[in-house]
Image (cartoon, helix red, strand yellow):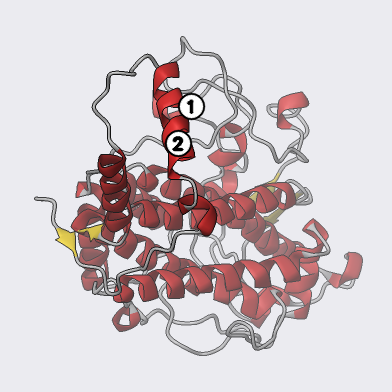
Amino acid sequence: MAPKNLPAYESPTTTTSPNESSSPSGSAFKRRSFLKGLGVVGAALSTGSLLTTAAEAQSRDSIITVGDVAILRFLAAAEILETDLWQQYNEFGGIQDSEVPAGSGSPLYTKALEVLDGDMPQYIHDNTEDELTHEVFINAYLVSKGAEPVSLEQFRNLPSSQATGAQQIGRLTNLMQLSVDTTWFTRYRSRTGNPDLGDTFPQAIPSIATGQHPAIPRTDADVQPDSTKPKHISDLTQAIANTAGFHFATIEQGGTSLYAMLAQRVTSLEVLRIVLSIGGTEICHFQTWSDKAGNAPQLSVVDPVTGLTVTFPDLNAPPLGGEDFQTNLIMPEPTAFLNRKLPACSIIRPTATKGAAMGALKFLTADGLFIGQSKDFFKFMRTLAIEADLALRQ
């Protein structure tokens, strides 16, 4: 795709402080001293040419390329999808208020989430609000630059859960038939492996990585009290909450890598600032959920709907366990980066840019989030992903 520039919707004005303009001779002296220190005293740089370069750089900040637009449009779509799934989690287990679209809550499901951490309702609520602000901001920024925003409203056709607590509205994502990839748990604790270098990692919770599992109650049958259990939380309800706890981290580690990948293809410094700033909150989310997931209690239960056995093992015991796999770790262990000849480094992983957007779409699809979606939905999302992956830094 040939690179093109889109004109800015508004041209920013540049102001100069008195301190910057009051002593041109001093500035020139400092500039000559700096160039001398670099061994380029003879370089043909004048005050005028430096000012022209600065003006051109500022002007460049006010435009975005077609590639930048494609990246932002894919990220807007991803944030809309994240908002949709987090809203469903919030309706059942988050704080119900006017800050985000709310439901009526599910008391036993919420109690099961609080087994992982007492602050879960607040964190779920805040994560939902974050994703909502991301989608609204990115779309508004696109409009401010004269670009087309993203809407997925025409694909809001998936059914809501029938359990008490959920709004009965059309959904974009399906949280009731998930195959949750839990390799992030072993990947971020590995001291040698990096998916960018071709390494693969075992599932921390194999039983929820295959088959289709609920992470929210499907009906009220999923949240029936069990008087023989602490707080009357049945093993089935706790298994659903445990699945959600791991899914939270699965989603947010994907966003962490996606923003880091696409930032490397951005041209405009302002767009780069947006991608890096929003990407940083995805890291905060992942770090939070990676801690909470490790508190999922051990259990094994047969799902009466699917007939599948769901098992949450002791993650502090073999084949995991030990210093690198203890469940309260939230910092990435240092590992191989760029190539194995360089020293180990604590990093986000993966961050290779090839096929970043399409890889994210495939990851979300394999997760089961889009079970029941239309062919038109997949066509629309593939188009956004292809366009984002064609973006090149200019």
Q: Is residue 246 above or below residue 351?
A: below
Measuring from the top left, give residue 36's x and y in whole percent: 41, 18
Measuring from the top left, give residue 316's x and y in whole percent: 78, 34
Q: Is residue 185 above or below residue 229?
A: above
How crowded pointer 1 is (Cα within 10 Å; few <14, some 14-19, many 20+) is rated as many
Q: Earlier in the sequence, mark 2 or mark 1?
A: 1
Q: Is residue 94 above or below residue 206?
A: below
Residue 229 figure quarter: bottom right
Quote the CA–CA distance across marks 2 and 1.
Answer: 7 Å
Q: Can residue 210 be seen?
A: no
- Amino acid carrying label 1: it is Asn
Taking 381 as reference, is 303 left or right?
Answer: right
125 or 369, nearer to the observer? 125
Q: Which mark is residue 194?
A: 1
Taking 387 as reference, is 17 left or right?
Answer: right
How crowded pointer 2 is (Cα within 10 Å; few <14, some 14-19, many 20+) is rated as many
Spot the residue most to the top: 341
- Check disc 1 and report its element: helix, strand or loop: loop
For label 2, the residue is 350
196 or 345, nearer to the observer? 345
- Amino acid carrying label 2: it is Pro
320 or 219, nearer to the observer? 320
Q: Residue at x 56, y 44 (%)?
A: 182
Q: Can residue 328 be seen?
A: yes
Residue 364 figure quarter: bottom left
Measuring from the top left, give residue 289's x and y in whole percent: 67, 53
Do callouts 2 and 1 mark residues in contact (Cβ within 8 Å)?
yes
- Check disc 2 and report its element: helix, strand or loop: loop
Measuring from the top left, give residue 275's x and y in whole percent: 43, 54
Q: Quadrant of the C terminus?
A: top left
